[in-house]
Amino acid sequence: MTDIETTSVSEQGFVTNSQVGDFELTIDATDEEGPNPNAVLVADYASCFLPAFRVGGQQRDHDDLGKLQIDAEADVDDDDDLSAIRFDIYVEEDLDDSELEEVVDRAEGICHVHAALREELHADISVEGGAF
């Protein structure tokens, strides 16, 4: 049995409309009608890392991290391939650097997108507690 099914269609040009379950996602290599594939990947990585971070916090006895935010940025090379990803993570709960590092380490082990990326694209992460 298949766990994930999508259908992606490009009628013309560089726009692709993907059906993912009940959701439609428009991706455009030219950034005109939607985000480009690299931007979608970075956003997907961040949106996977946030709940992984929250679960990692719970597994390290930090049950209420409060608000979490990732400001993500990425670099592309001359071939438009992703070459680096960086996350600045902001955490409402005021944890010390050691506690934050433990949660980040655990989140890296939980996030499925992190696991799917080649190692050189794993996000360079900085994290700040008591941020809100």
Image (cartoon, rainbow, N blue to C red):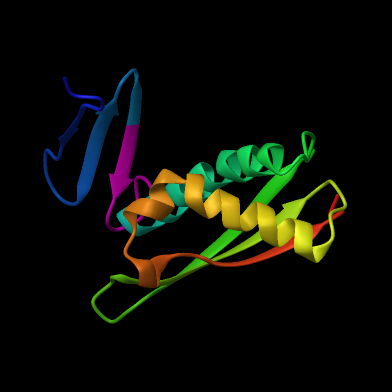
Query: Quadrant of the rendered structure where residue 124 is?
Result: bottom right
Specify the principal SS of the magenta part. Answer: loop
From this viewpoint, which residue is outermost toward the left? 11
Percent position of residue 62, x then y: 78, 40
- Residue 29 position, x and y percent, is 27, 56
* Residue at left offset 50%, top offset 65%: 123
Q: Looking at the picture, how far across and down is residue 5, in whole percent? A: 21, 26
Vertical side of 126 occupied by 30: above or below: above
The residue furthest front is 60
The quarter of the picture where residue 51 lies is top right
Where does the image place residue 104, in percent across and percent down from the top left?
Answer: 62, 56
Q: Is residue 27 magenta?
A: yes
User: Is residue 35 in view?
Assistant: no
The region drawn magenta spans 25-34
45 vs 67: above or below: below
Quadrant (top left, top right, bottom left, bottom right) of the N terminus:
top left
**Figure quadrant of residue 24:** top left
Residue at the image point whose x is 52% and y is 50% from the top: 46
Q: Nearer the viewer, residue 29 or 41?
A: 41
- Does 20 appear in magenta? no
As drawn, 57 above or below 36:
above
